[in-house]
Amino acid sequence: MCELLAMSANTPTDLCFSFTGLTRRGGDTGPHKDGWGVAFYEGKGVRAFHDADASANSRLAEVVQTHPIKSEVAICHIRQANVGDICLANTHPFMREMWGRYWVFAHNGQLQSFQASEGFYEPVGSTDSEALFCDILNHLRRYCHRDTPTEELIERLVRMSRAYASEGVFNLLLSNGDWLYTYCTTKMASITRRAPFGPARLKDADVTVDFESETTPNDIVSVIVTEPLTTDESWDVYKPGEWRLWRKGEVVMRGVDQADH
């Protein structure tokens, strides 16, 4: 299994604090040592970093931790391989262009009987996760278009997620830079930080930050993870089958698939 982290904010925000906590789980406080990746949206562009080495020992991860990259949406992933070799091509998050936007995807889980349908998008690596991503985009490309309303697009994604989840563990992060879609079958939690801000301490590293000194009163920052990253904050745990759509740090759509879980 793998661990996920995503961020949605209403203003460009530094992700270094949360990313530092996550990377310690990649071969130090956790077993997820088979590669890592992170993608930061900057406008319509994406700044992406990938490494097939354990994040806890990665010099590249150290660079990202100490470089104050600003982003309104970011997706991170640390891998514990179960399908596919340990190599750069198999590290999440995966990215493709569709309708003039970069779509970024990360997945935690395994679908036992999943078979991707043929289409325009093909996987480069050998993971079932990348094949799943291509299957999702091929479906959207076939049945939607660039002007499909977001609500209609998300309704279709929810139906697809429900079908995938019926085949196994399916914890998902997907973004096109405008919104962030999350779906949980087993583990996922979130926290939304807003004024009045306070301090927070990481669970996996001896690091504390005072968000009041790092933010403005108008900032809203939400972090979505597999397991809570801090010890002194109250995290909102997803229900099995729960999905949420995030935009600018806020949940704008949500639901729970009760019947299938």
Image (spheres, helix red, strand yellow):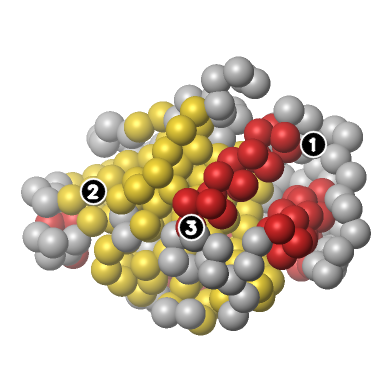
Measure the alpha-carbon separation of dots 2 and 3: 25 Å
Label 2 or label 1, whichever lies nearer to me, is: 1
Measure the alpha-carbon separation of dots 2 and 1: 34 Å
Q: Which residue position holds label 3?
A: 150
| Amino acid marked by disc 3 | Thr
Residue name at image x 72 percent, y 35 percent: 163
| Amino acid marked by disc 2 | Arg
Residue in front for this viewpoint, 87 or 235: 235
| Amino acid marked by disc 1 | Leu
Label 3 or label 1, whichever lies nearer to me, is: 3
Q: Which residue position holds label 2?
A: 193
Q: Which residue position holds label 1?
A: 111
Secondary structure beneath label 2:
strand
**In the figure, is residue 38 to the left or right of 119?**
left
Residue name at image x 66 percent, y 34 percent: 162
Q: Give the mark nearer the N terminus: 3 vs 1.
A: 1
Mark 3 vs 1: CB contact within 8 A: no
Secondary structure beneath label 1:
loop
Task: Indicate the position of residue 31 as horizontal and vertical percent values.
Answer: 65, 41
Residue name at image x 41 percent, y 29 percent: 237
Q: Give the mark nearer the N terminus: 2 vs 3.
A: 3
* Mark 1 neighbour class, 10 Å CA radius: few under 14, some 14 to 19, many 20 or more: some
Task: Indicate the position of residue 121 as horizontal and vertical percent values.
Answer: 81, 67
